[in-house]
Amino acid sequence: MTLIDLACLLTLTVGSIYLWQLNRRGLRICNLVFGVEIAMFFGGGAGLVLMMLGGRWAAVGLSMGAAEGTGGLAIAPQIITAYPVLALVVLNLARGSFRNDALRQASL
């Protein structure tokens, strides 16, 4: 889990560099990373549901909980503040401000 968090943060850093340049590539990268973080959040909830079902599914849910319990510290502040959801909304509302890569190359 910690490696997945690190990969998300590093990819988010690369995406933010492109966002500073108002490049659409940064928008696509950040949308992807925030989508993955939201899916990870719901995946953790699915593990809890599996534990409550009992039987064989409880073992799967416990394994998911154990793996998530050892990581998740890097993106925990983002999840607690709902940052991925807010960032997806704001970035996609500001989509018109980003230049297309082809237009950028033509203007240089």
Image (cartoon, rainbow, N blue to C red):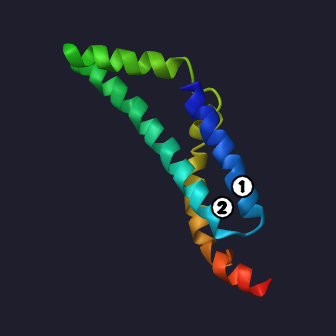
List the residue tagged with mark 2: 26
Residue 100 in percent (x, y) is at 64, 78
Q: Quadrant of the C terminus?
A: bottom right
Q: What residue is rendered at 73% in x and 69% in y?
A: 22
List the residue tagged with mark 1: 16
Dot 1 lies on which element? Answer: helix
Q: Are marks 2 and 1 in contact (CB under 8 Å)?
A: yes
Amino acid under disc 1: Ser
Packing grade of label 2 (10 A; few <14, some 14-19, many >=20) is many
14 or 41, which lies in front?
14
The first of marks 2 and 1 along the sequence is: 1
Q: Does residue 80 appear in the picture of this structure?
A: yes
Q: Does residue 100 appear in the picture of this structure?
A: no
Drawn side of residue 12 relative to residue 66, left or right? right
Q: What residue is rendered at 66% in x and 48% in y?
A: 12
Dot 2 lies on which element? Answer: helix
In the orientation shown, which residue stands out farthest toward the right?
A: 108
How many numbered circles are shown? 2
The image quarter containing residue 72 is: top right
The image quarter containing residue 75 is: top right
Vertical arrangement, residue 31 with respect to residue 58, above or below: below
Kindly identify which numbered label has been placed on residue 1: none
Residue 70 in percent (x, y) is at 55, 17
Residue 25 in percent (x, y) is at 63, 64
Q: CA distance from mark 2 to mark 1?
A: 6 Å
In the orientation shown, which residue stands out farthest toward the left?
A: 55
Vertical arrangement, residue 63 with respect to residue 44, above or below: above
Q: What residue is rendered at 72% in x and 86% in y?
A: 106
Vertical arrangement, residue 73 with respect to residue 26, above or below: above
37 or 89, which lies in front?
37
Q: What residue is rendered at 44% in x and 42% in y?
A: 39
